[in-house]
């Protein structure tokens, strides 16, 4: 059969030739083309896999663009998303549950587990050995962050240190090492790479790691508006995350160099070994593990008790596992 292109419109041509409407992005439906994602990420180690994603070229390969919004911790990204200033962002379970309650935010994947990156670090000169020894001391905490909530609601009480037993000094994680060095605080509940830096520089000593109490999964969440309007783009986005996972496993040096350059560009002085220690405490594996609902339910119960959320979430609405299933099927 001879096809006369001048006598047919584009749809008819594609139907006659058996073609599928695709963009220049590999295997992406046209509906996902030229989408710009307002991407939030935290500038501590929890946000660095997302930073690598944005610098890797995998999003552009699939026809996606990002406008990045950097913040000190994920709870700030969550607040931006509730206000619809950002489309996607990462944060741990407590912040996600609060964001779902306040703004209907939806998890499209668990991206990583970072429990080993969160620690209680005390000033080395104080010689403090246990959490109970922090009674009456000044502890730097980024109030409202997931790690802050986990410390206040769970870890502190489990170690004889309940709210009111210490002086909480509110500050973001980026400023805590300087405060410890200046001796304006006695300890900090912080994340990598700041904990490794504090140890390497002889400022602080880790006395407790969060992974003993909580493996701290970090979620990539999206606003319900973005999910409704751009399901194809989200599937393409998750495929790019699977590319990142492969790099993390097969080419960690490449990943490490990109992320290391981020911190050194911000003025942090880290030798590669210190940074390697920090990154080694992050486990990137996008998906939805089978024990996720019980884990989130436990956190939601605490947040209800603390009157931080109004009701138990409907996890079938809060967790969109189908989008990751589609990404894996087409990867």
Image: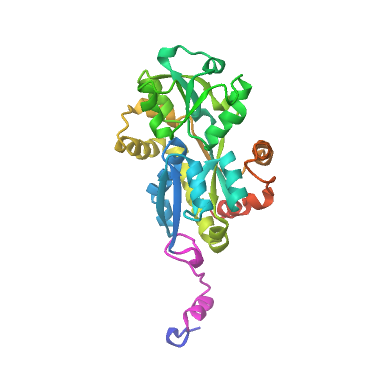
- Taking the image as shown, residue 268 lies to the left or right of residue 146, namely left
User: Which percent across, then down, holds residue 234?
Assistant: 52, 56
Q: Residue at image x 52%, y 18%?
A: 136
User: Which percent across, then down, holds residue 304?
Assistant: 67, 40
Q: Nearer the viewer, residue 303 or 190?
A: 303
- Taking the image as shown, residue 165 lies to the left or right of residue 265, namely right
Magenta span contains residue 261 = no
Magenta span contains residue 27 = yes
Provide the residue span drawn in magenta.
9-33
Look at the picture and state if 102 lies above or below 272: below
Q: Residue at image x 44%, y 33%?
A: 171
Look at the picture and state if 259 lies above or below 234: above
Look at the picture and state if 51 lies above or below 182: below
Look at the picture and state if 3 lies above or below 183: below
User: Which percent across, then down, holds residue 241?
Assistant: 49, 47
Which image quarter: residue 164?
A: top right
Q: Nearer the viewer, residue 273 or 242?
A: 273
């Amino acid at each position: 059969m001879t096809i006369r292109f001048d006598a047919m419109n584009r749809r008819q041509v594609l139907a006659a030739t058996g073609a599928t409407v695709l963009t220049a992005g590999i295997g992406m439906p046209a509906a996902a083309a030229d989408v710009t994602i307002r991407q939030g990420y935290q500038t501590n180690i929890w946000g660095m896999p997302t930073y690598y994603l944005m610098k890797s070229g995998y999003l552009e390969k699939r026809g996606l663009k990002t406008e990045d919004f950097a913040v000190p911790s994920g709870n700030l990204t969550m607040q931006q998303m509730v206000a619809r200033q950002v489309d996607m962002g990462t944060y741990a379970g407590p912040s996600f549950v609060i964001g779902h309650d306040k703004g209907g935010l939806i998890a499209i994947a668990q991206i990583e587990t970072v429990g080993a990156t969160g620690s209680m670090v005390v000033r080395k000169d104080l010689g403090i050995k246990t959490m109970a020894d922090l009674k009456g001391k000044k502890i730097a905490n980024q109030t409202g962050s997931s790690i802050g909530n986990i410390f206040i609601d769970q870890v502190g009480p489990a170690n004889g240190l309940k709210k009111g037993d210490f002086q909480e000094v509110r500050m973001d994680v980026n400023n805590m090492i300087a405060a410890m060095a200046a001796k304006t605080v006695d300890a900090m509940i912080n994340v990598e790479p700041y904990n490794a830096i504090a140890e390497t520089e002889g400022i602080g000593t880790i006395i407790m790691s969060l992974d003993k109490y909580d493996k701290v999964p970090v979620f990539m969440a999206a606003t319900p508006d973005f999910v409704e309007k751009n399901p194809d783009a989200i599937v393409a986005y998750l495929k790019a995350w699977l590319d990142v996972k492969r790099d993390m496993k097969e080419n960690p040096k490449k990943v490490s160099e990109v992320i290391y350059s981020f911190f050194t560009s911000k003025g942090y002085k880290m030798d590669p070994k210190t940074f390697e220690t920090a990154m080694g405490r992050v486990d990137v594996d996008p998906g939805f593990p089978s024990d996720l609902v019980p884990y989130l339910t436990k956190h939601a119960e605490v947040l209800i008790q603390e009157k931080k959320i109004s009701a138990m979430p409907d996890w079938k609405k809060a967790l969109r596992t189908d989008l990751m299933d589609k990404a894996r099927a087409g990867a």
